[in-house]
Amino acid sequence: MSATYLDPSTLEKLISAAIAAPSMHNTQPWRFRLEPDSSTMEIHAIAERGLPHEDPHGRALHIAAGAALFNLRVAVTHFGWKPVTRLLPAPHDPGLLASVHITQRAGPRAVHGADLYESIWRRHSSRFPFSDERLPGSVLRELAEAAHTEGATLIVPEPHETARLLRVTADAEHRNRADADRSAESRRWASRDEFENTGIPSSALGPQDAFEQLPMRDFTARRSVEQLPSRPFERTPTLASLSTGHDRRTDWLRAGQALQHVLLVATAHRLRTSLLHQALEWPDLRNDLRSATAPFDPVQMLIRFGYGPEGPTTPRRMPSLFLDLDGTAASDDPN
């Protein structure tokens, strides 16, 4: 079968969709390489955009790449092709995280491609207070099914377990704030200029919860009661834990795909979301996040769902900066 031709406009749309995925501190730690002869898109890690203190093993980087991979799958399907995915396809090249072979469409379009493509552009994290309105059970089941489709488990705990997870997260946030190296690393990616296209702009940081009802990350490590929000955060937040059966690099990539599938389904239902991953950055606290119903399944992410204001869009760098057509990538210096 001949290679699928990707015109420049479509190629740019595919890359734009992929890089719309979330990444820790908006580091955007990925690069894409197209092999025109085989119509295969590769996703490579950019080590320079990693977080050596907060993510020393690259777990968050892999999850971000998995989220980008899912967006790419959705976009490829949206344009009428079939994505054939391989995780870690080259053992000799650990920086090559995944590949997507783009083939001619065979059979009906996948549901997620038809339904979720528009959600890619509407999804972004909201760190603002949500309302106390409960999520419909049917939506929660759909979110769990989305995670299951990608090989992960999404659990919405009972209120007492939610309170425990928030206490563990608060403990992690206090540790992060007290750790000089982690605080400096976090501040490095918090930008005051929204047009730098790197890191998180100040407008997207959102208010801190002055009552410490909900442990929101403080990127400045200088939290004060002056950051009191205009209205309080929800009393009973809807929290969900995303876990996998194992904790290997492939599991992290699957978790990233599951995370993005869940986030896009939530977006399609007009839900707001934010990610609480402070406790995942400390091995002992991450272990404390395990569910009593699945004590051996490592948690990969905590997700907060709700109805509330739409947070500002976090900027992305130009798609051309991520694409490598001839084996020579553009500079990846975050500064």
Image (cartoon, grey):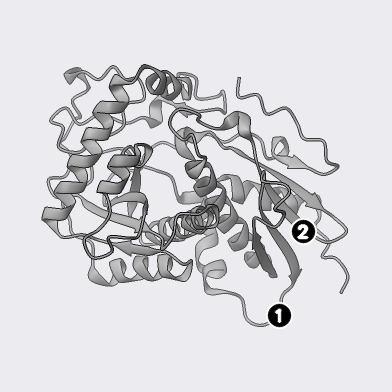
Q: Please say whether residue 132 is visible from this viewpoint.
A: yes
Q: Residues within 10 Å of mark 2 (few under 14, many from 20)?
A: many
**Mark sitting on residue 135:** none
Q: Quadrant of the C terminus?
A: top right
* Residue under the point 14% across and 48% down: 163
Left or right position of 305 against 15: left
For label 1, the residue is 106
In the rendered structure, which amino acid carries the disc numbered 2?
Answer: Thr
Residue type beneath disc 1: Ala
Decide which of 72, 202 is in the foreground and name it: 72
Contact flag, marks 1 and 2 (Cβ < 8 Å): no
Where does the image place residue 47, in percent across and percent down from the top left?
62, 33
Task: Look at the picture and state if 313 lies above or below 143.
Answer: above
Residue found at the far bottom of this picture? 107
- Disc 1 crowd rating (10 Å Cα; few below 14, some 14-19, many 20+) is few
SS at mark 1? loop
The x, y position of residue 270, in whole percent, is 35, 57
> Residue 40's mark?
2
Query: Could you tell me residue 295's position as x and y percent?
Result: 27, 60
Q: Is residue 183 above or below residue 155?
A: above
Where 293 falls versus 196 (above or below)?
below
On screen, residue 13 versus residue 112, left or right, reads: right
Q: Residue at x 64, y 67 (%)?
A: 77
Q: Residue at x 34, y 45 (%)?
A: 274
Q: What kind of element bears circle 2?
A: strand
Near-viewer residue (243 or 100)? 243
**Is there any visible trace of residue 21 in the rendered image?**
no
